[in-house]
Structures are given as structure tokens and as C-alpha cells.
């Protein structure tokens, strides 16, 4: 409890003690002490009975005041501790946690992220999921929310367009113990039996993978060999666990310590697939716009953009 509520409580208790002493003195002066031990308040003159009731009333008021003084700080603390809820694309799972920790250390604002495919997060927001900010792996899903009046990019020059915070990169990854070298030639090799990609209907990296294979005129040939994962994180798990011989995954996944130690990657030429521009929007139902804007400013700051680059994302600017 803070100093002010404690001061109020102490003053209130002091007032009760003073009134009680005064009352006891007046009763003692108006009635013999022996009678006081055997008489109830009903035997006293009405003015004494009324005086005896006052401390009880003060005690009841004190109890109510004490409950209020306890409840108000607790409610304020609960409100202050409401976390910033971020819907984050799966390719950010290896990247975002340290940034959220640094943000909290810098601003005292706690943020929590839910990582899933961008399409699934979009559906959840459409269904009323209580997110404050959406960090998508492409621009189409947040733009869909803006057009539906469910999100905006307030504070930017064009609030009808998602805020581009980074760009993704597609890579081909293989395990070191598979003895397969990641390259464009591997995609047409008979040694490749299973190729993992993210679901192109849900994940931007899945669409990029299909676009790259189509550009290479290999999609029809490789379609029977495709192992489809729900999102880009699961795609990396498929190939890392040996459930696929190779995988078209994000550079952010390939650069994690685990996959760096266990495999090798090849950068898929960018002209084989559309740019993977990653966009952010503010969910319209948020009640935490100031913290959301602080986080967006932090995410777009030069130091954090440089940190994103080291993690496999191309800075937005």
C-alpha cells in the first residue's frame, strides 16, 4: 500500500481513539464506576447511548475505507500490468523474444507474442481475438483487416497501408548428415525424395516456395514430393527432424543456433519469388494504443532494425 493510503488509515484510527477516550471520560463523569460494570448502554441516559454508538459507526466506516484503500491500488496495479498482446508471424519466433525482453527493460512495458501462420492470426483477429498488434509475414493479411475496419496503421502517412517493418528471405535447407548439398540443382535431383514447404494457403513463405518452384518449372514435378507444414516454424521442424530431405524455409529459421549447427542453407534467388514484405497493423479494439506506438517506434528504430538483419530479416529502410 502506498504512503498516502497509510497516512489516511493512520489518521482515521487516531480519530477513533480520541473519540473513544473522550466518550469514556464523559460516561465516567456522569455515572458511578461500579454501575458501569453492570449496566448496559440501555441503562444510560440517551445522550450517553448515542455517544457510545459513534465509535461503532466509525469502526464500520473505517472497515469500508480500508477495503477501498486496498482495492484501488490493486486495481491500478492489475491495469498497469496488462501485457501488450502481439499476434506474430511464425518466422518471428526465433527473432522477437529477445527484442520483447529489451523493450520491457527499456520501457517497463511487458509484451507477449503468439506465433502462428499469418492467415490463422488474421482469422483469429476477425473472430475477436484480443490482440493489440499484428505483425504479419506479408502485407495482404493486415491489409485485409484494414479494409474490414478491424485494424489500422494510425500514426503513419497512409493509415490504410500496413507498416512495413522488415522483408523476409527464402532459403533451401538440408541436414548436414543427409549428405545433400542445398542448391537449385538439388531440387531437380532424384536424390530428393521429400521437400518440406509451408502451407501456401496460410503462410507467405509457402506461397513464396510455390512461386520459386513454379519459376523454375519444377512445381508439377515436385508436387508429389511436397510435405506441407502448417507454418514456417513447423516446416523447419519437419526437415530438422528428418521427416523431409530438404525444406524451403525462412532465413530466420535457418540462422537459429540449432539449425546452424545441424544443417546448411542456400539463398533462393530473390527474382524467383515475390518480395516477402512483412507488415504491421494496430488492431482496432486495442485499449493500449500508446504502448503499441512505443513498440512500433522501437521496432523501427535503427538499432532494432540492425538486430533484425543479424537474425535473417532485411531491414525495412
Image (spheres, grey):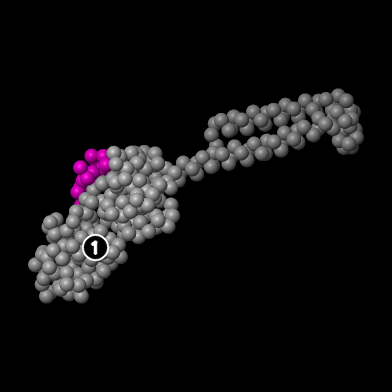
The residue shown at (58%, 40%) is 70
Asked if residue 143 lies left or right of residue 79, the reply is left
Q: Nearer the viewer, residue 196 or 75?
A: 196
- Which residue is drawn at the image coordinates 24% and 63% (left, top)? 206
Q: Is 230 situated above or below 158? A: below
Q: Quadrant of residue 208?
A: bottom left
Question: Magenta part of the protein: which range?
Answer: 300-317
Q: Is residue 133 left or right of residue 7?
A: left
The residue that appears at 39% across and 50% down in the rendered structure is 150
- Residue 26 coordinates in the image, percent (x, y): 83, 25
State the residue position of label 1: 206
The reply, left or right, for residue 183 in relation to residue 46 is left
Residue closest to the eye, 132 or 260: 132
- Residue 16 at x, y percent in the picture: 71, 30
Compared with residue 188, is residue 21 higher up or lower down, i.e. above or below?
Answer: above
Q: As displayed, is residue 4 above or below residue 174?
A: above
Quadrant assignment for the N terminus: top right
Amino acid at each position: 500500500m502506498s504512503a498516502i493510503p497509510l497516512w489516511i488509515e493512520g489518521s482515521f484510527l487516531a480519530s477513533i481513539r480520541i473519540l473513544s477516550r473522550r466518550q469514556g471520560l464523559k460516561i465516567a463523569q456522569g455515572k458511578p464506576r461500579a454501575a458501569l460494570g453492570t449496566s448496559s448502554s440501555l441503562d444510560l441516559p440517551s445522550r450517553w447511548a448515542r455517544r457510545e454508538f459513534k465509535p461503532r459507526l466509525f469502526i464500520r466506516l473505517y472497515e469500508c475505507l480500508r477495503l477501498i484503500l486496498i482495492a484501488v491500488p490493486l486495481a491500478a496495479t492489475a491495469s498497469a500490468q496488462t501485457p501488450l498482446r502481439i499476434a506474430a508471424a511464425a518466422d518471428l519466433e526465433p527473432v522477437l523474444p529477445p527484442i520483447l525482453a529489451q523493450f520491457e527493460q527499456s520501457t517497463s512495458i511487458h509484451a507477449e507474442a503468439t506465433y502462428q501462420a499469418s492467415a490463422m492470426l488474421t482469422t483469429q483477429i476477425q473472430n475477436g481475438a484480443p490482440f493489440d498488434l499484428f505483425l504479419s509475414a506479408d502485407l495482404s493479411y493486415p491489409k485485409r483487416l484494414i479494409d474490414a475496419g478491424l485494424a489500422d496503421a494510425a500514426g503513419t502517412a497512409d493509415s490504410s497501408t500496413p507498416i512495413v517493418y522488415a522483408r523476409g528471405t527464402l532459403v533451401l535447407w538440408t541436414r548436414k548428415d543427409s549428405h545433400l548439398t542445398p542448391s537449385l540443382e538439388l531440387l531437380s535431383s532424384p536424390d530428393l525424395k521429400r521437400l518440406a514447404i509451408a502451407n501456401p494457403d496460410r503462410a507467405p513463405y509457402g506461397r513464396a516456395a510455390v512461386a520459386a518452384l513454379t519459376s523454375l518449372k519444377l512445381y508439377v514435378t515436385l508436387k508429389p514430393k511436397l510435405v506441407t507444414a502448417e507454418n514456417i516454424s513447423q516446416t523447419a521442424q519437419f526437415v530438422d527432424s528428418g521427416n523431409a530431405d530438404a525444406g524451403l524455409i525462412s532465413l530466420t529459421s535457418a540462422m537459429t543456433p540449432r539449425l546452424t549447427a545441424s544443417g546448411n542453407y542456400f539463398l533462393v534467388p530473390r527474382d524467383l519469388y515475390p518480395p516477402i514484405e512483412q507488415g504491421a497493423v494496430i488492431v482496432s479494439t486495442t485499449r493500449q494504443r500508446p504502448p503499441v506506438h512505443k513498440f512500433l517506434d522501437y521496432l523501427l528504430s535503427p538499432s532494432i532494425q540492425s538486430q533484425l538483419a543479424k537474425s535473417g530479416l532485411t531491414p525495412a529502410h
